Image: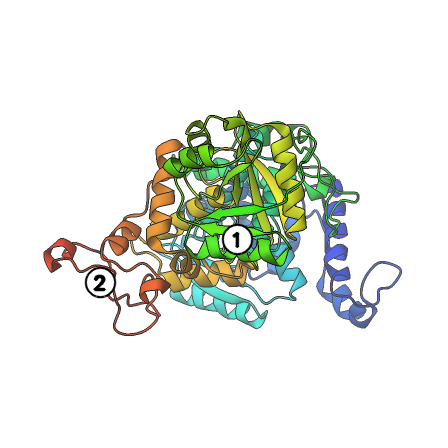
Amino acid sequence: MEDDPATLKRGMARVRHQLHQLGAPVDELGFPTWDRKQLRDQIDFTTRLEWARTADPVIEAVPERLDAKCAVLAHADSMCGPGAVFATNTTGLSVTEIAARSGRMTRAVGIHLADVDRLADSRGTGVVEVVSTPVTENTVTRDMEGLLGSLDLTPVRIPDLPGFVGAALTMGYLNSAARMCAEGYASCADIDTAISLGCGLPVGPLTQADTIGLDVVHDSLTALYQRTGDRMYSPVPPLARMVSAGLTGRKSGQGFHHYPTPDDKDTPDRVGAIRRRTGAALSVCRVGVVGSGVMAAGIAEVCIQSGYPTTLVGRTGTTVFARLDTEAKPGTILATTTSSLSVLDCARATSRPHDVAGVHFFNPAPAMRLLEVVRTPLTTDHVIATIHAWGITLAKHTVECTDRTGFIVNALLLPYLNHAATLLHNRHVTPPVIDTIIACGYGHPLSPFQLLDLIGLDVTLTIQQRLHDTSPESTLPPARCLEKLAAAGHLGRKTSCGFRNYHTPCNPVSTRPQSALSRQPLPPQSPWP
């Protein structure tokens, strides 16, 4: 149901496109032949809202503008019977306010489908957030959950929080990726590739934004920013300019990337990328790895397996760089694998800062395909070209960025995980609820709290604090529960206890007096499985 014929026509095309994804044979009108009669009987396309008179429920999915949503539901209220249930598909607006202005305060809920395209591809095996207001009748919420369950969807009950869970986390993450691209830290293609390979996600954030629709993303961010005042949700200016120009993503054929056909599922053409400066790559004959930890050993293993004579020694840091400067022969490239320190600071500790770059491997180095190549303002083109060429010989996919805290992956991933931990502050949701929504609804191979425990809460805390120190306006401070768990020595898998308890009893890294932990909102032994 749409309000004008042109929009209705686009909606019909989108329905046919989703049906094609099911892989069934189709007739001359584009409908599956095995389901033709059933679909003809059950699907109507109209611009007349009066057709909703006998509907139960009525689901609103108009653009993310409060007045428009309320007007549609108020009109439906004037026509539908008293038993009809109203559901809004809002992302960032208040379900309670929409319910009040619709005229059905006690019979209105919010339903937020995590990822419509992913649900279509997986034939309906996803999560739907069901949002009730303080006065929603319990029977209404239960009936909606029953309806969703009958569609092979998993309903998860969520309070009326800004963005609920999925959108609260996802919209800030998408906005951060758009900001990273707009500020020239990395290209659109490299940002998406880094997140896909570094985090194992189905698509990168900018492709995800294009798929949702940049107009939808912009409106959702605007609603969340107006509701929360959190600068994380303040839409980056290029989003508004792109939407004004009609560049709304897949549906228009152009967004952060170019799509040969609107709604095409194939890999997009990468456009808008920052052109890499090119230089002549030097020949790499020998590799020296300075360090004694797991990462250093992993890098050495990768180099040896690729046929490079490799020497593994010592530890790393800016003081080590100063010593390397005197020990290494002229022309040797000095690279740091730091996760959070400034590459430029390491470079300035030497007399040859033009030969210094960041080379960020991911753990475990032999298995992870991604290699972040970090350029400082002083790094020469031939050094960067050499590292890219060397990375290819290691069977790595290289992406390039400028020197900033967290580079690409950590700069986007860690604030996202920290935001998930922040949602626990008021105890409205628990880690299992957040993990279920993100893993099942958004297709993440590891859910937020699984990933936090795997990375280590101490590592996360250190990097997040540095990210906040360098960008306090756009990055949240470390979550309080993250700080307190780390202070108690519950660091995740490496101590067998973090946001999850991996065996009983927990083994904290250090023991502190109980009085120091007396005000912790989380008990030392996490109650979540």
Q: Pointer 1: what residue?
A: 299
Mark 1, residues whose alpha carbon is within 10 Å: few (<14), some, or many (≥20)? Answer: many
Residue 388 placement: quadrant:
top right
Is 177 drawn above or below residue 108 in the view shown? Answer: above
In the image, 60: left or right of 477?
Answer: right
**Relative image position of residue 444 (x, y in whole percent):** 53, 58
Label drawn at residue 89:
none
The colour scheme used here is rainbow
**Relative image position of residue 70 (x, y in whole percent):** 50, 43
Residue drawn 37% across the image and 61% down it: 431
Q: Secondary structure at mark 2?
A: loop
* Nearer to me, 443 or 48: 443
- Residue type at mark 1: give it: Ile
Of labels 2 and 1, earlier in sequence is 1
Q: Calculate the distance from the C-alpha at mark 2 to the C-alpha at mark 1.
A: 38 Å
Is 39 drawn above or below residue 462 in the view shown? Answer: below
Residue drawn 51% across the image and 57% down it: 298
Q: Pointer 2: what residue?
A: 523
Mark toward the viewer: 2 or 1:
1
* Nearer to me, 208 or 297: 297
Residue drawn 74% across the image and 61% down it: 21
- Residue type at mark 2: give it: Pro
**Relative image position of residue 216 (x, y in whole percent):** 58, 41
Task: Please tell me how many numbered marks the rendered image carries.
Answer: 2
In the image, 388: left or right of 45?
Answer: left
Q: Quadrant of the C terminus?
A: bottom left
* Nearer to me, 129 or 191: 191
Toward the bottom, the furthest residue is 504
Mark 2, residues whose alpha carbon is within 10 Å: few (<14), some, or many (≥20)? Answer: few
Say whether residue 241 is visible: yes
